Amino acid sequence: MQLVVDIGNSNIVLALHDGAEWKHTFRFETSKEESSLYYKMKIVNLFWEAGIIPSQIEKCVFSSVVPELKNCFEKILTELFSKPPIVVHPSIYPKIKLLTDNPNELGTDLFANAVAAHHLFKKDCIVVDFGTALTFTVVSKEGELLGVNIAPGLKTAIQALVGTTSQLPEVYLTLPKSAIGKNTNSAIQNGILRGYVGLVRYQLHSIRREVGEQYIAVATGGLSKILGGLQNDFEVVDMNLTVEGLRIIGEDFGN
């Protein structure tokens, strides 16, 4: 069984694949303040509750975009499974050619998205990841990663607005029925959620104008289903795209 660990700015995801399908997925909040012992016991308890024993893990693939947790988790995973994990970095998977100015700046989650899109769809793709950041990763059917666009994610935008503006309440990511806000909540919801529909569409339009209309749009990330007005803009919505990319890297590593 292969374990994939994806540490993002908002959540940590552990996913187990048995060679045929994903058997278990665990998700919990990322915190830079917690100790190594906390995270180690968290993993041990999750596995115990699911009836998983460490000896079942034949391979572990690990990605982190949180530098403060990278060494901590690498040590934990080595201790739990008696061998070091495969640590993902942009040069680990040569089937994807990075055409960016500074390849080492690329987040390993975005790299995993590109790997999965190239492997699964074999088409020119724009991967839109609705996470802490809203990202657009452009990868050709030849496996060339052409570049990435980055905007604040939905939650990040709302938190920034509420956190820096007096008298604004906590706002939930729910799209109002009316496009005109009738109270503070719906005003913010409309401004950000409907605004992001336009943002995503214009980004896709601008990218395709430069690289070609044949590029399909693929959505992933925990918030990919929030913007209901975008259902017809994506050919695929795959919540597991990032962990799938990490799994593919792990399967090919050393081959």
Image: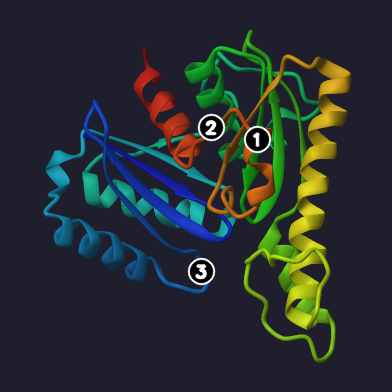
Mark number for residue 232? 1
Name the residue: 78% across, 72% down.
188
Quadrant holding the C terminus: top left
Label 3: how many Cα within 10 Å (few below 14, some 14–19, many 20+): some
Q: First in sequence: mark 2 or mark 1?
A: 2
Mark number for residue 220? none
The percent coordinates of residue 43 (x first, y second) are 28, 59
- Which residue matches tag 2? 112
Q: Nearer the viewer, mark 3 or mark 1?
A: 1
228 relative position to 99: left or right:
left
In the rendered view, tell whether residue 191 sits above or below residue 1: below
Mark 3 and mark 1: Cα distance apart in space: 35 Å
Mark number for residue 31? 3
Mark 2 and mark 3: Cα distance apart in space: 22 Å
Amino acid type at image mark 3: Ser
The percent coordinates of residue 150 (x first, y second) are 77, 44
The percent coordinates of residue 54 (x first, y second) are 16, 47
Q: Nearer the viewer, mark 2 or mark 1?
A: 1
Amino acid type at image mark 1: Asn
In the rendered view, tell whether residue 21 sits above or below residue 11: above
Find numbered disc 3 in the image and state the secondary structure of the residue it sits on: loop
Label 1: how many Cα within 10 Å (few below 14, some 14–19, many 20+): few
Asked whether 167 or 177 is in front, the reply is: 177
